[in-house]
Image (cartoon, rainbow, N blue to C red):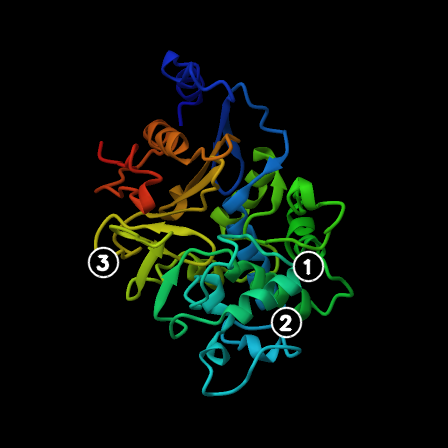
Amino acid sequence: MNCAAVQKHAKSPKYFMWTRGFAVLAGNGKSTCCTAEKGLDDRKQYLMMSASKMVAAYTILSLVGAKKLSLETPVSSILTDFWTKSAGDKRSQVKVKHLLDQTDGFPHFSGGMGNCRRSTTHECAKEAYERGVRSTPGSTYEYSETSFYILGAVAIKASGMKTSNFNDVFKTYLGNRLGMKCDYRPYAQDQKKFPNKIDPGAHLWCSAYEYAKFLRAVTAKKVPGIPSHLIDLAEKPHTQRVKMTLGGQPVGPRIEYGYGLWRHCQTERCDSRREVTLVHSMGMYGFIPVIYRKGSQSMWMIVARSAPPIGIPDSMKLVTDFTKLIVPFKLSGTAPMQQNGLMSRHPMKFNR
């Protein structure tokens, strides 16, 4: 990796209009090899939005590693205070794995995506449950925060900890083990009144520097408490045979979902034995962590931005630009991002 070229490119006049700034970090399973900043401190903590999902998923996998639950565990056996076990109700079929890859069938909250109207993670899970499912679990994918509110309630209960706050579970089972100085806490306006209203899929407050500790461990497949086969499983394209929608619009082409992350497929087969595995967990404000997996050459990159209300399109352009400078191996084919028009301005192409 030519870090000098990366740092020079970050100062390019083509980015002069980006007054909020950005930072790019890249490395492998052992270290951070390069950092380039343009107006954004990579040590500054801010809201990750949906880049939180990958971290939340690995918190769940850590609970699986600790045998607190399994991927096949029915949610009805954990959230016993309100979840039905009736075979005639499709909600009884929802398992932990369906929540992780968002094929559980639950729609958005009645107030819109992520807009739970109750006061705790557990109560938000109950609100999602009361809305019912639209389809048989495992048959359709819909990007929705309801899945991760339910996962949060599952994690709290399964952990056996005396807490109502998902952050305590994250810290115990993942954050502290990796030395991550990050926290899950609600949106700023809710922090005093509703401190336990945490959406594990959106409420991680972290810096690029601290998030990189997580990516290094995942890239090396050495996350404390999580067997490597679970990391492999998290990156698989679990949605290849289901209908996928984001905001009511179809997702694709060659874009699948794993556990809390997107999987870009360079071919229709999406075979990790024959192509580079490329996964990411993009946040709405423009924070995008990416892993390029190719054996001992595997690498990761973070494009760090915080540009509310939506910073994804420009950040995807940065991912494309810096991938060409950072990744030493060939990425064949293309993986255009067309989800609900959010990334249509800058298709993610890797032909070189």
Nearer the observer, disc 3 or disc 1? 1
Of tags 1 and 2, the one toward the viewer is: 1
Asked if the residues shown at circle 2 and circle 3 are in contact, with their CB atoms under 8 angstroms apart, the answer is no
The quarter in which the C terminus is drawn is top left
Which residue is tagged 3? 269
Q: CA distance from mark 2 to mark 3?
A: 34 Å
Look at the picture and state if 217 lies above or below 319. below
| Quadrant in which the N terminus appears | top left
Secondary element at image label 2: loop
Instruction: Give the residue at mark 1.
Output: 120
Q: Amino acid at mark 1?
A: Thr
Image coords of residue 2 (percent x, y): 40, 23
Q: Residue at x 46, y 63 (%)?
A: 229
> Which residue lies under the disc numbered 2?
68
Q: Residue furthest bottom?
A: 87
At numbered mark 1, what does the secondary structure look like: helix, strand or loop?
Answer: loop
Amino acid type of disc 3?
Arg
Q: CA distance from mark 3 to mark 1?
A: 41 Å
Q: Residue at x 27, y 40 (%)?
A: 331
Residue, far right? 162
Label 3: which secondary element: loop
The answer to whether any part of residue 203 appears in the image is yes
Give the amino acid at mark 2. Lys
Residue depicted at 53% across the width and 33% down the height: 32
Question: Which one is in front, 24 or 253?
Answer: 253
